[in-house]
Image: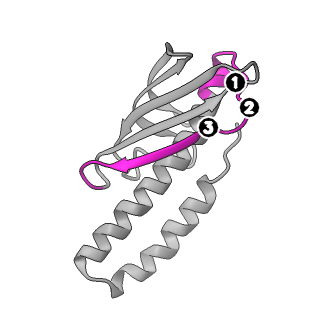
């Protein structure tokens, strides 16, 4: 499975942990939320791409994803888009709690629906090799 971006996000999270001690509580929360969004976005891009490929669709490139916090790092929505090699529109939508148990290097847990040209092709509660 292609896994770009996950390892750099994990390294960034570790480096940011050292800076939290010098921040106010509000700044710490913002850093944690931003880091959770980055981790969820990157994990969803890699694992979502693999999920579409498991359905027999060759993805032109890794999915492009966004993650937005709707309730802090504990409540994120993830939206991904991409195109298959044969020109079909791919979309992945889901929600995840970005704690250590739900987002890791090899899996992202939550609620995910993958569609091809608007038609659902999978609905999963975990994406990635570590599921």
**Labelled pair 3, 2 in contact (Cβ < 8 Å):** no
What's the distance in space between the residues labelled 2 and 1, CA to CA?
5 Å
Q: Which residue is found at the position 48% from the left and 56% from the top?
A: 38
The x and y percentages for residue 65 are 53, 43
Q: Is residue 60 magenta?
A: yes
The x and y percentages for residue 127 are 52, 32
Dot placed on the residue nearer the N-terminal end, 3 or 1: 3
Q: Is residue 86 magenta?
A: no
Q: Residue furthest bottom?
A: 22
Q: Residues within 10 Å of mark 2 (few under 14, many from 20)?
A: some
The x and y percentages for residue 123 are 44, 19
Residue where numbered disc 3 is placed: 63
Looking at the rendering, the stretch of residues picked out in magenta corresponds to 51-72
Foreground pick, 80 / 20: 80
Q: Residues within 10 Å of mark 3 (few under 14, many from 20)?
A: many
Q: Is 128 on the left-hand or right-hand side of 120?
A: right
Q: Which residue is found at the position 27% from the left and 48% from the top?
A: 70
* Residue 104 appears in the rendering: no
Dot placed on the residue nearer the N-terminal end, 2 or 1: 2
Q: Is 84 on the left-hand or right-hand side of 126?
A: right
What's the distance in space between the residues labelled 3 and 2, CA to CA?
9 Å
* Residue 73 appears in the rendering: yes
Q: Which residue is found at the position 43% from the left and 47% from the top?
A: 67
Foreground pick, 93 / 109: 93
Considering the image in quadrants, where does the N terminus appear?
top right
Residue where numbered disc 1 is placed: 84
Residue 60 disc label? 2
């Amino acid at each position: 499975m292609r896994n770009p971006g996950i390892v750099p996000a994990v390294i960034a999270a570790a480096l940011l942990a050292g800076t939290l001690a010098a921040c106010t509580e509000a700044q710490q929360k913002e850093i944690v939320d931003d880091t959770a969004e980055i981790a969820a976005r990157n994990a969803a891009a890699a694992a979502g791409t693999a999920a579409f490929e498991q359905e027999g669709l060759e993805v032109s490139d890794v999915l492009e994803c966004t993650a937005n916090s709707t309730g802090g790092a504990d409540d994120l929505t993830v939206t991904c888009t991409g195109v298959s090699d044969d020109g079909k529109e791919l979309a992945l939508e889901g929600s995840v709690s970005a704690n250590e148990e739900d987002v890791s290097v090899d899996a992202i847990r939550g609620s995910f629906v993958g569609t091809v040209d608007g038609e659902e092709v999978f609905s999963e509660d975990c994406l990635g090799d570590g599921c």
